Image (tube, rainbow, N blue to C red):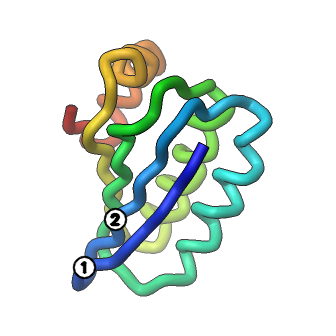
Amino acid sequence: MEFTHHQEEQVLHISLSGNIIFEDTHEVGNFLDGLLEEEFEEAVINLTGVTGITSSAIGAILDFYSQLINSGRKMRIKGMSDKAYKVFQYFKLDTVFPVER
């Protein structure tokens, strides 16, 4: 699992890749929590390189989303594999925040 980020004006671009399993959840959560200190209006999480994702890792993304909303910011997901998209659909996350395939 790998993750990176960069900022373009007020948009924070976050890329996650690899197979994100239960054991990675704490690391993903810490990474995302650390980004909350940055100044931005919208976070865009790119999941193009994600080959698999567990519900606990999705929970870390949901926690990040909740904190963003509470601070008046936005988030969207873009670029995900069919496998990851099916997981997001199963949990109806595509109805919680924008998901672009």
User: What's under tag 1, amino acid-wise?
Assistant: Glu
Determine whether the residue tagged by mark 1 lies in a helix, strand or loop.
Answer: strand
Provide residue 41's location: percent of width, then percent of height: 31, 76
- Could you tell me which residue is drawn at 32 percent across and 62 percent down? 74
- Could you tell me which residue is drawn at 31 percent across and 68 percent down? 42
Query: Is the C-beta separation of discs 1 and 2 under 8 Å?
Result: yes
- Relative vertical location of residue 33 with respect to residue 44 in this rendering, above or below: below
Provide residue 95's location: percent of width, then percent of height: 31, 30
User: What's under tag 2, amino acid-wise?
Assistant: His
User: How many residues crowd mark 2 within 10 Å: few (<14), some (14–19), many (20+)?
Assistant: some
User: Which of 3/33 is in front?
Assistant: 3
Disc assigned to residue 62: none
Q: CA distance from mark 1 to mark 2?
A: 8 Å
What residue is disc 1 on? Answer: 8
Image quadrant occupied by the N terminus: top right
- 50 left or right of 60? left
- Relative vertical location of residue 67 with respect to residue 86 in this rendering, above or below: below
Provide residue 43's location: percent of width, then percent of height: 35, 63
- Could you tell me which residue is drawn at 79 percent across and 36 percent down? 23
- Could you tell me which residue is drawn at 53 percent across and 44 percent down? 62
- Relative vertical location of residue 90 with respect to residue 68 in this rendering, above or below: above
Image quadrant in which you'd find residue 101: top left
Disc assigned to residue 13: 2
Looking at the image, is mark 1 or mark 2 earlier in the sequence?
1
